[in-house]
Image (cartoon, rainbow, N blue to C red):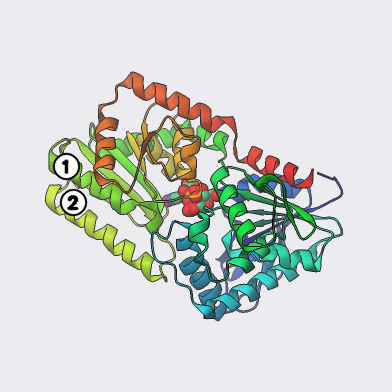
């Protein structure tokens, strides 16, 4: 990358939290994987991060924190409803996740989506110096690349989609398909989690726009546009370090003891989202108990479900569904003082999360569709003891790399139940062999390599 060119990151949210302590306001960096990966690069390159700060009405003034400049973009309450909860999370999210819930195509959400994308493009255009590099993230901002190119043809523009890009036949349902594709084609480089995502995008682009040529070298309106896979990863060293922290290990031991000493622990960790397959994994656990293949005194399921998008009806519904299944299993198989499913509807601190990864015998990751799924990789990175079994949906992007997991089709209830039985019966030697292979896969490239590869490809 050219030394003189600065880097601007653009995402729906800037990764900061506003703290109010004794009357004064300050900002604190939040701990997502993206900010961890990009912070060192941004600090080195005097970078700027542009995005929504989480409040409606006037945007807070730009500020600097830990060597990164943050530039908030404003959003009205109506735009939050239409652009974010509406078009982003009730149209794009379900459509891009194989339509596991029906996407809603509402015309009144489209224009706010256009307007907000425009505002982001204008904010970047105003902040960028000649020749800067801009990296735009995710489905909320698919129109921003071409809007920005129009304003600032001198910039290098990259775009990364964190969620899957759907097969052409599914994407074809989108009433604004041409506008969205043309929006994305404004970038020089388009990154996807998987090769299939890049392929799907190129197929749709060729069908619905003037783009032509192979995914890796498309031509669009006289420019080269490249679509390729850049599978995201995690800060592997951080999880390995936490896993060896005496305090985290002590928490693991306390957790195991609290859950009943010798009971086999199955664990799920997700945002409470209908794409994650939390319902199917609990129903499979219920089947396992019903069949007698496992006794409630011998095993326990812990599900951490982080509250998410609760304003959207399908999310309220999946919460009700999950809580009903939890209640049914505990009603049927629990004893006073001994629950069969422990359900935590909250976010827990990361050291606590890692102590759960360490306590688990079986990590269950069963999304119907997932861009990557970082939880699967974090579990593997944490298991420095080479133990623990990963049950993983074949429809998570992570399945491409985590071949030694017990891979399942989450639409197949009997298949998921059978995978639990298989997990419970694996010998220590088999578990070790699989986990070692998984760990090699996860350690092959971390989130820092991911960011480097993308930025190198963008600027070369
Ligand atoms: C999108 C795509 C893609 C979860 N519970 C707690 C907690 N977490 C953290 C995990 C992990 C992250 O949240 C979840 O990441 P995922 O990848 O599993 O899923 P999405 O939120 O849907 O992310 C996905 C990702 O973007 C990156 O490109 O992989 O496919 O959908 O890091 O650790 N963290 C803490 N407490 C919790 O209770 N501290």
The earlier-in-sequence mark between 2 and 1 is 1
Q: Please provide percent x and percent y for residue 235.
A: 57, 39
Name the secondary structure under disc 2: helix
Q: Is residue 102 above or below residue 334?
A: below
Residue for badge 2? 329
Mark 2 in CB contact with mark 1 (< 8 angstroms): yes
Q: Which residue is drawn at 65% across and 76% down?
A: 115
Q: Please provide percent x and percent y for residue 201.
A: 59, 54
Name the secondary structure under disc 1: helix
Q: In which quarter of the image is residue 257?
A: top left
**In the rendered view, does 287 fall on the left or right side of 153?**
left
Between 80 and 372, the one nearer to me in the picture: 372
Question: The C terminus appears in which quarter of the rendering?
Answer: top right
Between 254 and 425, the one nearer to me in the picture: 425
Question: The N terminus appears in which quarter of the rendering?
Answer: top right
Q: In which quarter of the image is residue 355?
A: top left
Q: In this view, does 439 lie above or below 23?
A: above
**In the rendered view, does 400 fall on the left or right side of 146?**
left
Residue 62 in view of the camera = no
Distance from Cα at disc 2 to Cα at disc 1 = 9 Å
Q: How crowded is mark 2: few (under 14 residues within 10 Å), some or many (20 or more)?
A: many
Q: Is residue 307 above or below residue 236?
A: below
Q: Please provide percent x and percent y for residue 153.
A: 82, 62
Q: Residue at x 45, y 71 (%)?
A: 104
Between 88 and 394, the one nearer to me in the picture: 394
Q: Residue at x 52, y 26 (%)?
A: 440
Q: Please provide percent x and percent y for residue 238.
A: 55, 37
Q: Is residue 100 above or below residue 227?
A: below
User: Residue extending furthest top?
Assistant: 429
Q: Count how many numbered circles sit on residues in the image.
A: 2
Residue 104 in view of the camera = yes
Residue for badge 1? 289
């Amino acid at each position: 990358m050219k030394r003189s060119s600065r880097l601007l990151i653009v995402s729906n949210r800037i990764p900061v939290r506003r703290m109010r302590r004794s009357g004064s306001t300050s900002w604190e960096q939040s701990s997502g994987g993206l900010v961890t990966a990009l912070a060192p690069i941004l600090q080195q390159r005097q970078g700027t991060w542009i995005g929504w700060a989480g409040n409606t009405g006037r945007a807070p003034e730009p500020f600097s924190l830990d060597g990164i400049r943050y530039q908030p973009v404003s959003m009205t309450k109506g735009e939050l409803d239409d652009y974010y909860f509406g078009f982003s999370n009730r149209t794009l999210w379900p459509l891009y996740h194989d339509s596991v819930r029906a996407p809603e195509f509402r015309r009144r959400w489209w224009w706010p989506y256009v307007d907000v994308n425009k505002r982001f493009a204008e904010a970047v255009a105003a902040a960028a110096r000649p020749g800067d590099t801009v990296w735009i993230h995710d489905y909320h901002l698919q129109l921003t690349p071409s809007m920005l190119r129009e304003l600032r043809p001198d910039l290098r523009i990259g775009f990364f989609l964190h969620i899957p890009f759907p097969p052409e036949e599914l994407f074809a349902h989108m009433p604004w398909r041409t506008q969205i594709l043309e929006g994305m084609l404004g970038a020089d480089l388009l990154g996807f989690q998987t090769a299939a995502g890049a392929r799907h995008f190129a197929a749709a682009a060729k069908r619905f726009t003037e783009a032509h040529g192979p995914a890796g070298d498309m031509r669009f309106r006289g420019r080269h546009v490249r679509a390729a896979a850049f599978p995201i990863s995690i800060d592997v060293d951080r999880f390995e370090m936490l896993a060896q922290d005496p305090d985290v290990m002590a928490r693991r031991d306390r957790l195991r003891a609290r859950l009943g000493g010798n009971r086999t622990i199955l664990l799920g960790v997700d945002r409470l989202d209908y794409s994650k397959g939390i319902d199917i994994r609990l129903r499979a656990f219920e089947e396992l108990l019903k069949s007698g293949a496992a006794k409630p005194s011998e095993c326990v399921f812990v599900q951490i479900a982080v509250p998410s998008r609760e304003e959207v009806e399908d999310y309220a519904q999946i919460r009700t569904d999950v809580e009903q299944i939890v209640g049914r299993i505990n009603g049927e198989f629990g004893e006073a003082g001994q629950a069969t499913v422990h359900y935590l509807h909250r976010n827990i601190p990361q050291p606590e999360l890692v102590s759960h990864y360490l306590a688990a015998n079986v990590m269950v990751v069963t999304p119907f569709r997932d861009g990557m799924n970082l939880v699967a990789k974090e579990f593997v990175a944490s298991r420095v003891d080479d133990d623990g079994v990963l049950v993983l949906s074949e429809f998570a992007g992570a399945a491409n790399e985590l071949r030694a997991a017990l891979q399942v089709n989450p639409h197949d209830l009997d298949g998921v139940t059978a995978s639990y039985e298989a997990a419970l019966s694996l010998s220590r030697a088999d578990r070790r062999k699989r986990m070692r292979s998984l760990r090699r896969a996860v350690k092959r490239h971390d989130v820092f390599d991911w960011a480097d590869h993308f930025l190198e490809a963008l600027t070369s």
